[in-house]
Image (cartoon, grey):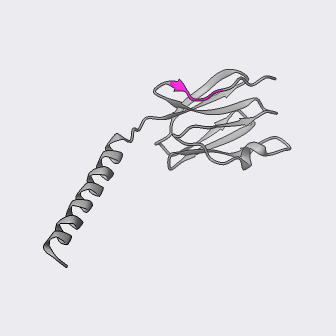
């Protein structure tokens, strides 16, 4: 290897580390999960705090490692339980029989929310 090859490798590694640093610094925390029951806000919870939330007597939601899932629901179809986890990138989980709606908030605003009609 020549001196120029070594310099090129060092420059490429420095640029890669700088890029990684910028991405990790720009990552924001503070996203929240909003739970709505029958059209009314049931609660707002931090996604970066692991917890299990009982939603009335019909559903149980779990926040773990920045992702929210429905771990139990008192309904026949269980679609919400088998739904993929939602996280700070957005998404929603809906349990229609129990009228429970989980959505991610960003800076206090809901992301990509459609109307749920009963």
Q: Nearer the viewer, residue 95 or 56?
A: 95
- Above/below status of 53 relative to 37: below
Residue plotted at (72% across, 39% down): 59
Q: In the picture provided, is 21 more to the left or to the right than 79?
A: left
Magenta highlight on residue 66: no
Q: In the picture provided, is 51 more to the left or to the right than 25?
A: right
Q: Position of residue 45 (x, y in %)?
A: 53, 34
Q: Residue furthest left?
A: 3
Q: Nearer the viewer, residue 35 or 4?
A: 4
Q: Position of residue 107 (x, y in %)?
A: 45, 27
Q: Residue furthest right?
A: 76
Q: In the picture provided, is 102 more to the left or to the right than 82?
A: left
Specify the quadrant that holds the N terminus. bottom left
Q: Which residues are magenta?
A: 109-113
Residue plotted at (38% across, 42% down): 27
- Above/below status of 5 relative to 15: below
Q: Position of residue 35 (x, y in %)?
A: 62, 30
Residue plotted at (31% across, 50% down): 19
Query: How many numbered discs sit on the rendered protein?
Result: 0
Specify the quadrant that holds the C terminus. top right
Q: Quadrant of residue 103?
A: top right
């Amino acid at each position: 290897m020549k001196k120029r090859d070594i310099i090129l490798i060092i420059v490429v590694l420095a640029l890669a580390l700088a890029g990684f640093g910028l991405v990790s610094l720009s990552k924001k925390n503070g996203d929240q999960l909003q739970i709505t029951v029958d059209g009314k806000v049931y609660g707002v919870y931090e996604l970066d705090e692991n917890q299990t939330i009982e939603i009335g007597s019909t559903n149980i939601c779990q926040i773990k490692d920045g992702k929210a899932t429905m771990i139990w629901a008192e309904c026949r179809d269980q679609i919400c339980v088998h739904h993929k986890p939602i996280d700070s990138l957005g998404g929603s989980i809906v349990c229609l029989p129990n009228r429970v709606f989980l959505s991610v908030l960003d800076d206090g605003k809901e992301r990509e929310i459609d109307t749920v009609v009963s």
